[in-house]
Image (cartoon, helix red, strand yellow):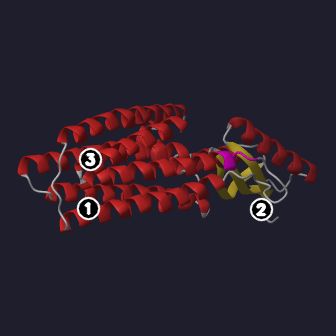
Amino acid sequence: MVFALATNLAAATAKLVAALFTGSSAMLAEAFHGFADSGNEVLLLVAERSSARPADEQHPLGHGRSAYFWALVASLGVFLVGALLSIHQGIAGLLHPEAMSSFRLAYLIIGISSVLDGASFLQARRQLGREARALARTFREHFDLSSDPIGRAVFAEDAAALAGNLVAFTGIALHQVTGSTVPDGIAAIVIGVLLAAVALQLAARNGDILIGGQAPPALRRRIDASIAAAPGVRAVTELLVTFIGPRRLWVVARVSLDPELSGARVERLLRDTEHRLLEESPFIARVDIVPRGS
């Protein structure tokens, strides 16, 4: 995270300097993009530290969900501000065109930024890849299903940064070849739209978890099967598996039991099943199983 923040700040500053020297709308849009990414990562650092706080009387399940709150703020606030500024700059460039200069400087900065963004992208890609292999998922499945808003956001913003560099390069190159400022202005608008799309996609996922979205179906099926396999359990009549933080699950189940079980055996069965689930997965933080009718 700190590495991604440092690379984005360096790239954004370089792009801002290049935009001032060249007069490129696309380059200025990319500077807005870089500063938006940097602001996003500052909020993600806040999210990471806030979510790690232990449980207390007011928050018996811990503070894990604060990670999704701050990630949602980052995606809707910082990202969308960057998107709106980029689109505004593109429209301004189309309505009030200015000839560019110092094309070589623009290409040099885009090249350096692509190297920095690429290094951060590969680091985020490797981290998500390791997690995907550990969970027996494809990379795409893990990106869509991961409960970690920080790793997902860093990967998405780095991918968008690389795409934005390509768009800016194309717009500037077409400006140089044709002499028209239109491609440069359009490139700035495309960068803004790209940034907005990333922001909304990340916000949707974080919002879904905040309002109680459940864990992936495959995981719920495994938990259901594990509970149903316990001796004395006839059926799992209700199962809720929700995220209470990154990689932290809360399992709530209602079960139908053998009516011949005594009260003491029921209590022991439920306790043993809860402990077994906690031992089976390091991601399950709490289990509450109650017999049907309770």
Q: Outermost residue, bottom direction? A: 95
Q: Amino acid at mark 1?
A: Gly
Q: Label 1 near label 2: C-beta < 8 Å?
A: no
Residue 288 on the magenta span? no
Asked if residue 52 is among those painted magenta in the image, a careful observer would answer yes
Callout 3: helix, strand or loop? Answer: helix
Q: Is residue 41 above or below residue 81?
A: above
Going from the N terminus, do you reach mark 1 or mark 3 first?
3
Q: Is 141 left or right of 51, judged from the image as shown?
A: left
For numbered disc 2, what is the local secondary structure? Answer: loop
The alpha-carbon separation of the residues under discs 3 and 2 comes to: 71 Å
- Whether residue 136 is visible here, answered yes or no, is no
Residue found at x 44% / y 53%? 36
Badge 2: how crowded within 10 Å, few (<14), some, or many (20+)?
some
Say above or below: 256 vs 103. below
Q: Which residue is mark 2?
A: 292
Where residue 165 sits in the image (x, y, percent)?
A: 29, 44
Quadrant location of the N terminus? top right
Q: Residues within 10 Å of mark 3 (few under 14, many from 20)?
A: some
* Residue tagged 1: 90
**What is the x, y in percent for residue 185?**
21, 59
Relative to residue 134, is residue 55 drawn left or right?
right
- Identity of the residue drawn at 78% across and 47% down: 54
State yes or no: discs 3 and 2 in contact (Cβ < 8 Å).
Answer: no
SS at mark 1 in the image: helix
- Label 2 sits on what residue type? Arg
Q: Which residues lie in the magenta part? A: 49-53
User: What residue is shown with label 3?
Assistant: 21
Residue count near mark 1 (Cα–Cα under 10 Å), binned few <14, some 14–19, many ≥20 = many
Q: Is label 3 or label 2 in front?
A: 3
